[in-house]
Image (cartoon, rainbow, N blue to C red):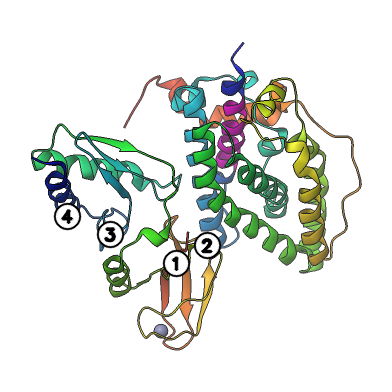
Amino acid sequence: MTDGLTEYALRLGDDSLILGQRLGEWCGHAPMLEVDLSLTNVALDLVGQATLFLGIAGDADKLAFHRDVLDFKNCLLVEQPNGDFAQTIARQFLFSNWQELLFRELTQSRNATLAAIAGKAVKEVAYHARLANEWMVRLGDGTAESRARIVNGLDWMWRFGDELFDVDDVVEPLIASGVAVDVRKLRGEWDQRIARTLSEATLEMPKPRRAAKGGRIGHHSEHLGHLLSEMQFLQRAYPGATW
Amino acid sequence: MSVPALKDEVLAVLAGVPDPEVPCISVVELGIVREVRADAVVITPTYTGCPATQAIEQGIRAALDGHGFRNLKIETALAPPWTTDWISDEGREKLRAYGIAPPPQGAAKNSLREDVACPRCGSARTEEISRFGSTPCKALHRCLDCREPFDRFKCH
Ligand SMILES: [Zn+2]
């Protein structure tokens, strides 16, 4: 069993790493060159965050490339497949708006390293949230086709939102000692942000769904294993390879 | 050598190390050299995921080694986070001359602002094409007067 801080750093780092890898899958496939650049730039920021957070937990490269699927602690939202562009944007919309609030609070952490990483990354995540919010509006208030796709994408991703606001007994003591963020307190502000952008996008709030959870304790969807098989291929086939 | 004299000498060496992605300005003008101590040079990354970070460190290492500062370590500090306000005035002018619209001094607090003057003709009539550009630190804009597309250094 790892200590609380290590576990917390893994959760933060894995969220960033897995979403960064997902967005990297768009490289060369996005609908427009500008979108290709945007998604891969966001991916780069996320991988940078992951390197720093995982560095608290141990050797970041080893953790990224040598752990098995059950040892990953990311939320289920970030491992969801890209689907079409709208589904990718819906995932980013829910995640980046949450991560911006999370990092804003994490800058106040009593752990100086966590605070420093958050202080650095929160400025970048503001860009991610804005990118996602703008595309939500463009797709929702766009054509019948784009609207249908974003409604579907959001409907799929919505069930993974609740997990972002869960606190368990790993994090509880860290909240008490001022190290971790109490994400429960961010729910109201997140809901408002989501509602504001959806209203601008002329979209309705998705219907409530039974929440899907489990990522924080290593219970993942089948999608994560497929993602890792690609991400970890080289280090598994040629252990220790460098270039 | 006294520490102030050492500092001046090291900074002079580092002033010759270009940023690998924006080679018109040095790592000193970019504001990522935060401190020179008797035992170490402290640098800070621009963006967390900036792939140039390693190249920058290698460039600094080579310059230090080449000028007899092998014993100086390179340390990385994340806090306080780098901001475009740390780009020197000379650095801003060099960016403009290179065709990259520099971030206005003191603009970092409003990091999502979009107003920017064309680095070629000076026109204020410009539009953003893509907020994410060829590197993490740049966005893509277009001048509505001279019609040239140009890179803009994001306020950060
Ligand atoms: Zn112009």
In the image, the segment drawn in magenta is: A8-22
Asked if badge 1 and badge 2 are on a common chain, one would say: yes
- Residue A232 seen in this snapshot: no
Residue A53: x percent and y percent?
52, 32
Give the CA distance from mark 4 to mark 2: 30 Å
Q: Earlier in the sequence, mark 1 or mark 3?
A: 3
Label 4 lies in what chain? Answer: B
Q: Which residue is mark 3?
A: B29
Which image quadrant is residue B61 in? top left
Please provide percent x and percent y for residue A44. Answer: 49, 46
Q: Amino acid at mark 2?
A: Lys
Would residue B90 appear left or right of A54 to someone viewing this image?
Answer: left
* First along the sequence among labels 4 and 1: 4
Which quadrant does the C terminus of chain A fall into?
top left
Can you say whether B117 is above or below A18 in the image?
Answer: below
What is the CA distance from the residue labelled 1 to the residue labelled 3? Answer: 16 Å
Asked if the magenta segment contains residue A16, the reply would be yes
Residue located beneath label 4 in the image = B16
Up the image or down, B4 lies above or below A195; here it is: above
How busy is the neighbourhood of tag 2: few (under 14 within 10 Å), some, or many (20 plus)?
Answer: few
C-alpha distance separating marks 3 and 4:
10 Å
Q: Nearer the viewer, residue A197 or B155?
A: B155
Around disc 4, counting alpha carbons within 10 Å, would you say few (fewer than 14), some (14 to 19), or many (20 or more)?
some
The residue mark sitting in front, 4 or 2, is 2
Q: What residue is disc 2 on?
A: B109
